[in-house]
Amino acid sequence: MQNGEIAFEVEAYIHTILKCERLVLNCMQRMSGIATLTHSYTEKLKGYKTKLLDTRKTTPNFRLLEKEAVRIGGGINHRFGLFDMIMLKDNHIDYARGIEKAIDKAWQYIQTKKPDLKIEVETRSIEDVKKVCHVGRGKVFRIMVDNFTPQQIREAMEIIQDDFETEASGGINLDNIQLYAATGVDYVSVGGLIHQAQSLDLSLKAVII
């Protein structure tokens, strides 16, 4: 949209409009900023196979709206909560005393509780990637390479081959996202889609009929 363009029209009692306008506009401004920033990222990914994911770094009580804004902007919603995919992150792995044990515990859990639940594992080094590839076949669905450089991701991709989906995360922004996409990684996840988005300026103008 362009400055001054009318987004929509609403009809209501005067007091209803005055009570609701700021709350509604604040939400719309916030979500419009997220959708606009997401669109800027997805434009950068045109021509690459890599898809853009959001994260769970959302504003309390606004996750559904913020993730919908990402979807409208052209991104893909990753996890909505702890219930739709297991992600074994650094703390989980450390508390479990290693990647192998973390994968084994997660696998045992889903076999008895929710067999269709997928497992993603965060890796912090090439050695971690090798471990997941060794013990995770048939158990792990996706490997996340966290804070890897594009060159390190290329090295990881040679090890992973097509055995797992791949996701890059950490330090990815508008200036370097194409370098990451050029590695052939399946997904890039960017928390900044939400926590770095700037609200757009919207206003409501009254017309008395």
Image: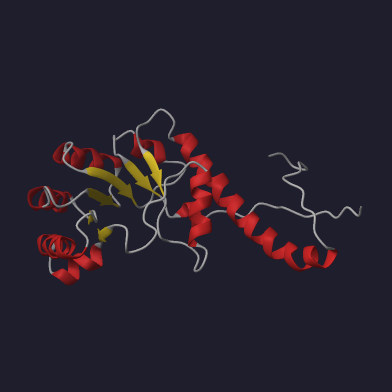
All told, the count of numbered labels is 0
Query: Is residue 202 rendered to the left or right of residue 156?
Result: right
Towards the viewer: 163 or 13: 13
Q: Is residue 182 left or right of residue 126?
A: right
Q: Quadrant of the N terminus?
A: top right
| Residue 109, position as x, y percentages in the image | 16, 65
Residue at the spot 12% in from the left edge and 51% down from the top edge: 136
What residue occupies the far top of the structure in this picture?
47
In front: 61, or 167?
Answer: 61
| Along the viewing direction, whichever of 170 and 23 lies nearer the viewer | 23
What sort of colour scheme is used for the picture?
secondary structure
- Identify which residue is drawn at 51% across, 68% down: 61
Query: As rendered, which of 63 and 113 lies closer to the eye?
Result: 113
Residue 176 in picture, x, y percent from top left:
41, 41
Q: Residue at x 85, y 55 (%)?
A: 206
Quadrant assignment, res 16: bottom right
Furthest residue in direction bottom, as rendered: 95
| Res 195 seen here | no
Image location (x, y in percent) of residue 7? 72, 45
Instruction: Indicate the position of residue 10 as horizontal and vertical percent values.
Output: 77, 52
Q: Is 162 placed left or right of 22 in the picture?
A: left
Q: Is residue 180 visible?
A: yes
Q: Residue furthest left?
A: 134
Left or right of residue 50, residue 105 in this image: left
State the image quarter where residue 150 is shown.
Answer: top left
